[in-house]
């Protein structure tokens, strides 16, 4: 996973605060058969929230240790060895940290959030690989990220996105949720 796709994934996780009842945009079959790979561009305020999640000590910059902690929390410990390479690319001023300007520049260079990155984020939540995200899976992922969220709150989050009423979030619902406040480019 590239540095920008991981940043994209982290952005997707921050979107849980913005859960609203979405509408169906397109089916997964339509997406797969179209050959299109839409790209969505998040806004600066949303990216600042993502940056602040990485910046656990709130010093205005992301250290390699902070970045590695997020990777571990997401169960992506296999990427730890890539962190120095990621920093070599993203740390434009060479100070050993990623500031917000560099963070945004990495996002721009990555071209926004690609559909494949959203699908990857979905699979990270879908721990049992059944094609749906349960409230329990949401709670587990948030716990790994250091967030406290009751099961009832996670159920409310799922209900806010669940357009077919099955009590779970499928790929279509997840895609709509993740892209509803972004513009397509």
Image: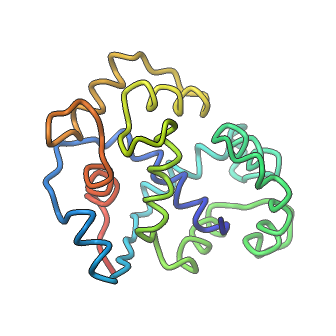
Vertical arrangement, residue 37 with respect to residue 163, above or below: below
In the image: residue 15, left or right of residue 87: left
The count of marks equals 0
**Image coords of residue 93 (percent x, y):** 80, 74
Q: Residue at the location (34% across, 83% down)?
A: 35
Q: Residue at the location (47% across, 26% down)?
A: 139
Q: Quadrant of the N terminus?
A: bottom right
Vertical arrangement, residue 113 with respect to residue 37, above or below: above
Name the quadrant containing residue 184.
bottom left
Name the quadrant containing residue 39.
bottom left
In the image: residue 64, left or right of residue 118: right
User: Going by the picture, which residue comes out furthest to the front?
Assistant: 130
Q: Nearer the viewer, residue 26 or 99?
A: 26
**Image coords of residue 46 (percent x, y):** 43, 54
Name the quadrant containing residue 167.
top left
Q: Residue at the location (59% across, 46% down)?
A: 52
Q: In the rendered view, how is the structure colored? A: rainbow
Q: Quadrant of the C terminus?
A: bottom left
Q: Residue at the location (46% across, 41% down)?
A: 126
Vertical arrangement, residue 128 with respect to residue 113, above or below: above
In the image: residue 5, left or right of residue 128: right
**Image coords of residue 106 (percent x, y):** 62, 72
Vertical arrangement, residue 149 with respect to residue 138, above or below: above
């Amino acid at each position: 996973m590239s540095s920008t796709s991981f940043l994209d994934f982290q952005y997707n996780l921050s979107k849980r605060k913005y859960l609203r009842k979405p509408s169906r945009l397109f089916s997964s079959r339509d997406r797969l058969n179209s050959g299109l790979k839409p790209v969505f561009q998040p806004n600066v305020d949303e990216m600042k929230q993502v940056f602040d999640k990485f910046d656990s000590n709130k010093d205005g910059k992301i250290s390699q240790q902070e970045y590695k902690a997020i990777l571990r929390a997401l169960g992506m410990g296999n990427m730890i060895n890539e962190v120095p390479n990621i920093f070599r690319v993203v740390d434009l001023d060479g100070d050993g940290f990623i500031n917000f300007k560099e963070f945004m520049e990495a996002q721009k260079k990555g071209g926004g959030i690609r559909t494949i990155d959203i699908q990857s984020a979905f699979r990270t939540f879908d721990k049992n690989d059944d094609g749906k995200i349960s409230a329990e899976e949401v709670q587990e992922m948030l716990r790994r990220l250091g967030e406290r969220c009751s099961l009832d709150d996670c159920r409310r989050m799922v209900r806010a996105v669940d357009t077919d009423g099955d009590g779970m979030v499928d790929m279509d619902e997840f895609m709509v949720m993740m892209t509803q406040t972004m513009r397509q480019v």
